[in-house]
Every structure is written in structure tokens, then in C-alpha cells.
Image: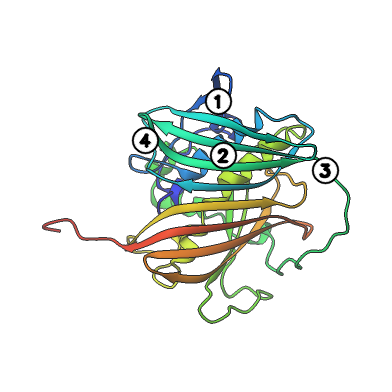
Amino acid sequence: MTDQSAEAGALGGTFPELLRLDEIDENLFRGRCHAGAPLRAFGGQVAAQALTAAGRTVGADRAVHSLHGYFIRPGDPRRPIVYQVDRVRDGRSYTTRRITAVQRGEAIFTLSASFKEPEKSAERQRTAPAVPSPAELPDPYLAWAEADPEGYARSTVSRTLQMRFVPDDSPGLPPEDPGMPQQFVWLRAASPLPADEPLLHVCALTYLSDLTLASTTAMHLQPPRFRRTEPPRLTLASLDHAMWFHRPFRADEWLLFAQRSPSSSDGRGLAIGEFYDAGGALVASAVQEALVRERREAPGG
């Protein structure tokens, strides 16, 4: 992913369309990804399609509980991506899959995913932060539509996802720790998703989770996309991405993505995020390390 990824270009259609894969052989699938930046496939979609491929080899009685991915090379949105699934283990309770995304014979992304049978146990969780509801917040894409109607018309973002950014001065926000910038974003799929396809909701959330984490790592250097008026000064790109899914959820209902970045150094930034549903249940966690570099001026620029 690069700076704000999917905000940089057309998003395509609904989530079932974005995650569609053709099965070309046993454990072998093929898909296409839209651009997140010019000539670079959006990393969140690559990860979500890789997870979709893994799920196609696992029984419906086992749900995804974690994934760990590495972005190795930029994907080319003009070419299909082949997903090779390695059935690492099918245990009594847990199932492990390793997926390699390939273009032109080279790996562009690898993912390890674990699935498990549901079980009952004692529960606890961090309390959800008190933030304004999505209904109280403006739609940032409306401002985009007013400022660039042609660009907005070329994009199908409104059919794919909805976002609401929580202002930094909103009452009730937890105080920001020194050296740890934070941001809070409401996210959801823009159109209803089938209730009986939990894998689709998990894959959709995987896609959504890659939209804003990189920008959180760079908030000490520049505001996120919808909060700045000047051109970006940084190059941001996902290096690796991990998620854990704690409780059932729907990706077509509002989820609060509470994010913070505890470190940035060596051209890399780390961001940690938690997803809460509207009732305050912690449904998933995400961690991402992103490349953070100052953009170089082009020769003569």
C-alpha cells in the first residue's frame, strides 16, 4: 500500500467483486487488484484476496483467527495475480495455510493464516474509547466530490466503503501519550454483505484495515489524506501486516478503528489498531509496519 492507498485511485465495485477469485487448479487461484497508487496494486486487496484463497481450502466450521503478511514487491494492477495455497496443517482444532501471491513468476506477497473451531471461554477486553458516532461526523468523500467532481465520478468509492474521521478535538477522546500519535476512524462496507458468509466479512475487514494505518505512523510529519491541504511530502508503503479476529462482527456495519503509533525510526513506522463495533465489543486488532520516507524532488523539479 502507498499513501492512503485506495484513496489514490478508483476502487472498483462491491466487496464480493473485489474479492472474486477464479479457481484454476487445486490450491491455485487467480484474481485482479485495483491500483492503490499509480501502477501499484492496493496491498489491502492483495491481502484480502490471499485470505479468500486460503479460506476456499478450509471447512466452513473453522473461522479465521489470525493472519500475518509480508509485502515483498509492488503488485501490478494491469496483470492478474496467482495465489498458491500450501495446506500446512489440518489439526483437530486449528488449521494453518500459507499463501504466496505471484506475478511474472515472482512472489509479491506472502500470507500465513490460521483458522480454528469456535469454543467457549471466559472473556475480557479493553473498553472502547468514547468518540462521536458516525452519524455526527461529516462524510469526507462529499468534500472530494465537491473539490474534484470528475475524479470522484471516475471512482466507485461510494459503492465500496464509507469512512468517518473523528476530529482530534472531539470530547471524550483518550489523551494522546507523548510520542504516540493517534487517530480514530469509523469504517464499513458501503453495501450490505451476506450474513451467512463470515469469511467475506473477515476478508472485507482485512481490506479496510490497510487504508489508514500507514498514515498513522507519519502523523508527526504530515496530516492524513483528508486532513491536509498541501500535496503529500512522504512516501508511505506497507511492509508487513498482521491481524487477530477476536469476536464475530459484520463488515457492513460501522466499526471504529482506534489507531496509535508508538514508534517511527530508520525509515519505518509502527501502527497498532483496534476495531470496535457500535456496541463497544473489541472484534479485531491489527498491527502494521510501514515504510516512511521523504519524497525526493524529480530532477529539474
- Give the secondary structure at mark 2: helix
Residue identifier under label 1: 21
Evaluate whether residue 160 shows in this view: yes
Residue type marked 2: Ala
| Residue 176 in the image, given as x and y percentages of width and height | 58, 78
Is label 4 in a helix, a strand or a loop? loop
Disc 4 target residue: 76
Asked if residue 278 is positioned above or below residue 192 in the image, the reply reads below
Instruction: Give the residue displayed 65% in from the left and 74% down from the top.
Output: 173
Determine whether, in the image, residue 167 is placed left or right of residue 231: right
State the residue lying farthest toward the top.
25
Residue highlighted by disc 3: 118
Q: Is residue 192 visible?
A: no
Side of 219 relative to 172 (left or right)? left
Q: Are marks 2 and 3 in contact (CB under 8 Å)?
A: no
Question: How many marks are shown on the rendered structure?
Answer: 4
